[in-house]
Structure formats: C-alpha cells, structure tokens
Amino acid sequence: MNHGSAKDDATNHGSVKGDATDHGSTDHGSTRDLTKIVRIGPLMARITPAVALSVATLLLFAAAAVGVTKARQSFAEADRADQGAAALASGRQLAVNFVTMDYRRFDSYSAQVLSGAAGSFRADYAAKLADLKKVMVANHAVSSVKQVEAGLVSSDQDSAEVIVGVVAPTSNTATPQAVDKSYRLRLDLQRTSERNAPWKVTNLVFVS
C-alpha cells in the first residue's frame, strides 16, 4: 500500500514537473509578447491621427508646390515660344515689305516698311526715302517677292534675331523683263508695347 502511495506520489511529482514545464513555457511566451509590445508601443504612439493628418497636409502642400512650379515653367516656355513665333512673323513680313517696291506706289510701300520699323533702322530708312524715290521713279523699278524663307536665330522676352531669304523678280528700264534676284537679310527686332505691332525691326543688313 505504501509502495502504491509512493507510486502515486511519483505520479503526482510527474504532474508537478509537467506543470512546472507548462509554467515555464507560458512565462517565456509572455516575455516575448511583452518585448514585442515594448518595441512596437513607441512606434504606434507616434502614428496618431494628428501626426497622420500633419504628414498628409505636408505631402499635399509639397505636391501643390511642385504642380505650381511645373505650371509656371510650362507657362513660361509657352510664352517664350509664342513670342519667338511673333518675332519671326514680324521679321519675315518686314523683309517682304522692304524688298517689295513699285515706283508707281512708292509712298504706300515705304509706309508699310516704316510701320514695322523702329530705332536707328527707322530713322535711317526715313532719311533716305526722298533719294530712293527719285531713283525708283527714274528707273521705273518694280520688285516683288515670289519665294520667302525665314528662321528664328535667337529670342528672349524683349529681343530677337531673324534671318530671311527672299527671291524677288525685279524689273526696271534696263531690264524690262523681270529677273529673279535673291537676297538674304538679317533683322534685329525689339519687343514693343503696341498691340498691333508687338515686334519691330531695329536693324536690317544684307548678308551673304
């Protein structure tokens, strides 16, 4: 009977050992869980609704700033392209007006040149008109343009340089039958505040 009791006691001790083992496993698991909580806790404490809202607001402002900057750049590039195209068109037209001439309508043609000119070029051209008219009328000179090519060399907000090439059939008393003459002109233009003539030629030279 005592042996049985001893056996039962041994069995009980086994149970106790098993219980001890179980308690040991539970304690280690709890420690690991606690460690996780301790490590994660501060991070979770930082990501509060207020912090998330602040971050979202900063990101929104950053995106808006980038969008505004890109919009300004696009607008500036578009405006620069538009101004370059306007300067090119003005330079091309003045070159055509300058080469086109008819002794019978000299005043009308020269007025078109003056309307697109400014600065020293306009002053020089106006000063020579009286002598030029005498030569044109005396020689019955007529000149027109049948072909024109123009290119923008450079431009900024206030100035531009244009190259224009023209083929001009020309006749006079010495050559009644019109002969094609080719000219290449370089024109410097200045931006003005005039609505109808935003770009005017300030210098014109013949180039080879």
Image (tube, helix red, strand yellow):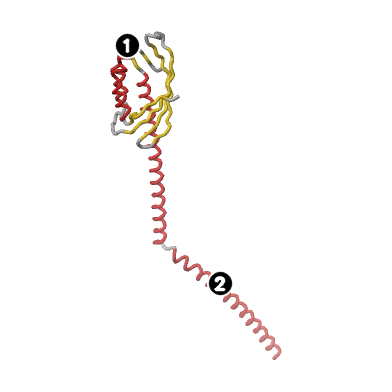
- Residue that carries the numbered disc 1 in the rendered image: 138
Residue 199 location, quadrant: top left
Mark number displayed over residue 8: none
Q: Residue at x 36, y 34 (%)?
A: 159
Q: Residues within 10 Å of mark 1 (few under 14, many from 20)?
A: few
Three-letter amino acid code at the position of disc 1 = Ala
Of residues 69 and 96, the one nearer the viewer is: 96
Residue 146 location, quadrant: top left
Considering the numbered disc 2 on the image, is that residue within a helix, a strand or a loop? helix
Considering the numbered disc 1 on the image, is that residue within a helix, a strand or a loop? helix
Would residue 152 appear left or right of 13 to someone viewing this image?
left
Question: Residue 144 at what x, y percent from top left?
Answer: 38, 16
Q: Residues within 10 Å of mark 2 (few under 14, many from 20)?
A: few
* Disc number lying in front (1 or 2): 1
Residue 180 location, quadrant: top left
Q: Earlier in the sequence, mark 1 or mark 2?
A: 2
Residue 1 versus residue 84 in the image, above or below = below
Q: CA distance from mark 1 to mark 2?
A: 112 Å
Point out the image quarter for the N terminus.
Answer: bottom right
Mark number displayed over residue 32: 2
Residue 200 versus residue 42 in the image, above or below = above
Of residues 20 and 122, the one nearer the viewer is: 122
Would residue 178 appear left or right of 122 to someone viewing this image?
right
